[in-house]
Image: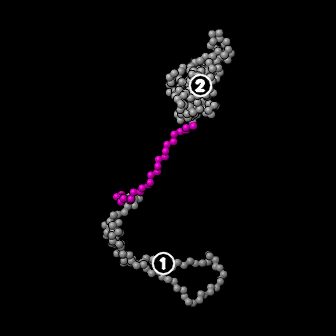
Amino acid sequence: MATDINDPQVTLLRQCGAVMSCGRLMGSLRVYKGAGETDRRHLRGVLVQTCTGCHWTKFPAGPYKFVDAEQLVLRILNSGLVRHNGTLLRPPSPVAAMLPLTQAGRIDCANLPCYTKGGVRTQGSKSCIEFKCKLCCSNAALEATANRIGHPWCNTHSQVAATERQMVQMAGPVLEAPIPSLPMVLDPPHPSTSSSDTDFAIDPQLLALSTSTPLALPPMCPIPMFIPSSSPPVASQRSSPTPISSLSVSRGSGRSLDQPLNPLWADVRNQATSSYH
């Protein structure tokens, strides 16, 4: 059976569809497990709908791999909510009734290329969900997990079941690697030609003047030192406080604080001005 890409068209029955219908309601769509008699194991993975009264059963589609059939049932029952496209439906694994028996009670592994070192077909397990040996069952579960595909539960080989949706949730979103931070490189300041008040430009002539011809600075003026007198301080007599209203404020003639500019500073200023122009 080839792998189908599109979901089959399944028409759900509301009432019993048998020839002698009992008129009872049909049960919900489900996947046949094939866990009963050996002659029905080949129906595992078939979509079925059974009457709740006379147990008449309809097989709308299948068989498929059991986990794929379960997802197909969910898509059919929720077709009005979510539309799924491009979902694969894999064929079922070979069942024990269809495998050649080499001896009484023995079946070969469902994985046909599985052989022992001596060239003999590896023995499968009848209680395995896919009738495989332990190694093939474990490899099938690992391959399904890596491809984010659901796989059935196998109690014999301790393989936990997982659906396709759980595989996607376990994988999580793809995280992009952060962009490595680049070191910040500052460009050297360039002389500005703008005459705006907010621009702080350095004139090349002044820069060359400050690096080539050092300016001669005038000597610093001596700081006057206060020398206390040798006479003892006169003790002030404490007098009664005078009201503020009776005090007369006398304002003397102010002394100008302007001082003549040192000739050396004037020469430095003239030299800088002439070099700038």
Q: Which of the two residues, 120 or 233, is positioned nearer the viewer here?
A: 120
In the image, residue 212 sits, relative to residue 189, either above or below, namely below
Question: Disc 1 vs disc 2: Cβ atoms closer than 8 Å?
Answer: no
Q: Position of residue 29 (x, y in %)?
A: 61, 21
| Amino acid of disc 2 | Ile
Gap between marks 1 and 2 measured at Cα: 124 Å
Neighbours of disc 2 within 10 Å: few (<14), some (14-19), many (20+):
many
Q: Residues within 10 Å of mark 1 (few under 14, many from 20)?
A: few
Residue extending furthest toward the bottom: 231
* Of pointers 1 and 2, the one earlier in the residue sequence: 2
Residue at image mark 1: 254
List the residue tagged with mark 2.
107
In this view of the protein, which residue sits in the foreground, 208 or 64? Answer: 64
Asked if residue 250 is positioned above or below residue 210 in the image, the reply reads below
Say which quadrant the C terminus sits in.
Answer: bottom left
Task: Please check the rendered image and state whether residue 175 is part of the magenta-colored stretch, yes or no.
Answer: yes
Residue stretch rendered in magenta on the structure: 170-194
Element assignment for label 1: loop
Q: Residue at x 59, y 18 (%)?
A: 59
Which of the pair 174/202 is nearer the observer? 174
Residue 267's disc number: none
In percent of width and height, residue 146 lies at 53, 35
Residue farthest to the top, as pictured:
20
Instruction: Say what secondary structure mark 2 lies in.
Output: loop
Give the total number of marks visible in the rendering: 2
Q: Residue furthest right?
A: 53
> Can residue 22 be seen from the camera position used here?
yes
**Residue 196 found in image quarter:** bottom left
Q: Residue at x 36, y 73 (%)?
A: 215
In the displayed structure image, the side of residue 181 where residue 145 appears, left or right:
right
State the residue at coordinates (63%, 31%): 156
Q: x, y percentage for residue 54?
A: 67, 14
